[in-house]
Image (spheres, coloured by chain):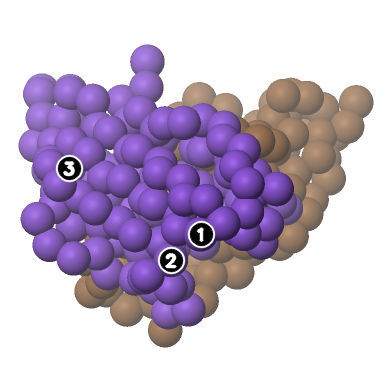
Amino acid sequence: GQNIDQPTEMTATEGAIVQINCTYQTSGFNGLFWYQQHAGEAPTFLSYNVLDGLEEKGRFSSFLSRSKGYSYLLLKELQMKDSASYLCAVRNEDQGGKLIFGQGTELSVKP
Amino acid sequence: GAVVSQHPSRVICKSGTSVKIECRSLDFQATTMFWYRQFPKQSLMLMATSNEGSKATYEQGVEKDKFLINHASLTLSTLTVTSAHPEDSSFYICSARVTSGGPLFISGELFFGEGSRLTVL
C-alpha cells in the first residue's frame, strides 16, 4: 500500500520562512510532486523531485531523500498570497504512474 | 493558458439525473488520464485511471457503474456521474499525462484540468 503524511495545518508570518514536511511509503516510487491549491481552484504545480537533493525555484525549494522517504517544501519571504493548501503527491510507476496525494497542509500566512 | 480543458466548470443538477464531465488535452496527446474527487477541506482522492482505447481502472471503493469513464480518443476522456445524488456533490478534477506533443511537452509530464464543481440538489 501507500502512505503519505504531512501536517494538517501550519501558520507563519509574512516575510518569514516555512518548511512543510512530507513522509511517504510506497513501492515503485517515480517522483514526488508539490502542488499549491487555493480554495475552490485546481492544484497548480510547484515542484518535482525524483533524485535526492534540493531543487530551487525562486522563493520555493523542494528537497527529497529517497532512502528516508522524506521530502520538504521550503517557502521563503512569505507573502499573504501564499496562504493556501500545499499538497505532496507521489507517483507510483508500479500502478501505471498514477499520482497519489497526501491530505494536504493548510498554510495560513499572517501579517 | 490552460493545456487541459475541463468542462463544465460548474454544474447543478437534480437528484437522479446524469452529468457528463469532459477532460480534453490541448496541443498534446494523452494515453492516460486520471480522475480525482475532492470534498471540502480534503485532499484529492484518485477515483480511476482512464486509458485510451481500453477500460478504466477504478480505485477500491469507487463504483464503476456509477462513475462511467470513456477515453475514446488520445485527447478526450469523459466522466459520467449516473443517477447523481446529493452525496456525489464534489469537486471533480482530471489530469492528463503527456504521451506525445510539441517541443514544449515532456513525455510523462502531468497537467491538471481546472476542475468541475458538481452540486446535486
Callout 1–callout 2 Cβ contact below 8 Å: yes
Residue drawn at (57%, 32%) of the image:
B10
The colour applied to the residues of chain B in this rendering is purple
Q: Chain of mark 2?
A: B
Amino acid at circle 2: Lys
Type of amino acid under label 1: Ser
Judged from the image, the secondary structure of the residue bearing numbered disc 3 is loop
Q: Which residue is mark 2?
A: B66
- Name the residue rendered at 50%, 25% in the picture: A58
Q: Residue at x 33, y 31 (%)?
A: B4
Residue at the (12%, 41%) spot, across then down? B74
Residue A104, position as x, y percentages in the image: 63, 55
Dot 1 or dot 2, earlier in sequence: 2
The crowding category of the residue bearing disc 2, from other C-alpha atoms within 10 Å (few below 14, some 14 to 19, many at least 20), is some
For label 3, the residue is B30
Tell which circle, 3 or 1, labels the residue nearer the N-terminal end: 3
Position of A22 compared to B51: left or right?
A: right
Q: Is residue A21 left or right of residue B109?
A: right
Quarter holding the N terminus of chain A is bottom left
Q: Quadrant of residue A94?
A: bottom left
Q: Residue furthest right?
A: A111
Please determine if labels 1 and 2 lie on a single subunit: yes
- Give the spatial CA distance, label 1 vs label 2: 7 Å
Kindly indicate which chain is depicted in brown in the rendered structure: A
